[in-house]
Amino acid sequence: MTAAAAAAASGATFAQTTSGVTLYGIVDAGVEVINHTPATGSAGGTVTRLNSGNLSGSRWGVRGVEDLGGGLKGIFVLESGFDIDTGLSGQGNRLFGRQSYVGLQGDFGAVTFGRQQNALYDLFGAYDPMGVGPRYSLNNVDAQFNGRADNAIKYTGKFGGLTATGFYSFGRDATVSNGSEVPGANKVGRNYGAGLSYAVGGLSIGGAYDQYQGASVALQDRSAKRAALGAAFAFGDAKVFAGYRWLRDDGTASTTAAVQRSNVYWTGASYKFTPAFQLTGAAYYTDTKNSGGDPWMFVLSGDYSLSKRTDAYLNIGYVKNKDGSSLGLNGAGTALVGANQTGATIGVRHRF
């Protein structure tokens, strides 16, 4: 993920030193050709389609800061995701579904209140070769790497090369009926996590933990727990990446769901052949316990900067499924069961 995109996606870190309001955003769209895609009422097949959000989710936002004196600032962010191909709002048709928070910032860091990114999202864009983009990335192996929580209190601090983040949500998804902030059932939808990263020279390492409870009274004692470690090392025009994610889900989807345990491993590298052209390759492997359905996903991406704000890209991906797995380049369940999938997307991204 480029520096400009990372800045647009960042949480409570602000470049402004005085009071002001900034309008910002990213618009990303491309044409994808992909095979072995499920379809209602048929066995599925190959489809050619226009997609919004490939390297980066399309969004617009407003962020502001007010100098309160004594090194203290008031801050806010309202960030809306949307599909450029249809004009519809994203993140469950929320107006500001990507982020919406207000808080205070100072030398101690920032404390914010609202709908916010989890610790995995905050830190692991730096450790995924594909920047945890919406498609053809770590996000498609585990969507919690793009996780957000409603009703959240969050702390973010940066001290030299050390970054710390932690949050607590009283109910992570307010769109679920009786699944958030239920009187007498405080565990329902609860979500919390924390993470640390450290950067020195060309090396960056980090780790994060995330846990949420089931989104109903019947499921509130069931939890999904994740822990992840990542590293990246830049030298010259090259950068290498590696990471690991552990999961134990006690059955948060339904009362009949079984315990799910899995490990995800990934690695990759990028190289800048010229100041404008970068090539990135990545591999992701999922090891699901007590199952032979352990898919591989491979991605190759070429990105060419037409200017500081506009780039063109080509993503090519392949997923190898077996024994009932259905991982697709656009996420779990987006390929026919047991079928391998090949896809390619050519697109344009603009930042403002």
Image: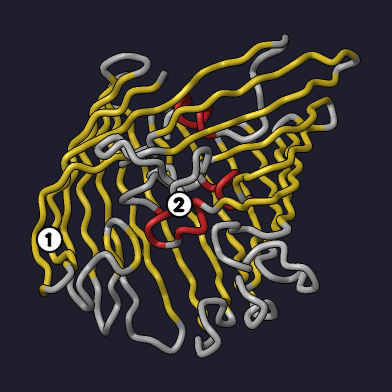
In the foreground, 348 or 315? 348
- What distance separates the C-alpha of mark 1 from that of mark 2? 26 Å
Q: Position of residue 94 (x, y in %)?
A: 49, 45
At a point 62% along the width and 51% down the height, the residue shown is: 118
Number of other residues with Cα within 10 Å of mark 2, as a class: few under 14, some 14 to 19, many 20 or more? few
Identity of the amino acid at label 1? Asn
Q: Which residue is labeled 1 in the image?
A: 35
- At horizontal 45% and vertical 52% (from top left) the residue drawn is 92
Q: Position of residue 36 (x, y in %)?
A: 14, 66
Query: Which mark is drawn over residue 102?
Result: none
The one of 335 and 130 positioned closer to us in this rendering = 335
Q: How many marks?
A: 2
Tag 2 secondary structure? loop
Q: Residue drawn 18% across and 69% down?
A: 40
Residue 272: quarter of image: top left
Disc 2 residue type? Answer: Gly
Query: Split into 4 quadrants, where in the image is the N terminus?
Result: top left
Q: Relative to residue 31, is residue 292 drawn left or right?
A: right
Residue 92 numbered mark, or none: 2
- Picture quadrant of residue 287: bottom left
Q: In this rendering, would 132 be left or right of 83? A: right
Q: Earlier in the sequence, mark 1 or mark 2?
A: 1
Q: Position of residue 103 (x, y in %)?
A: 76, 32
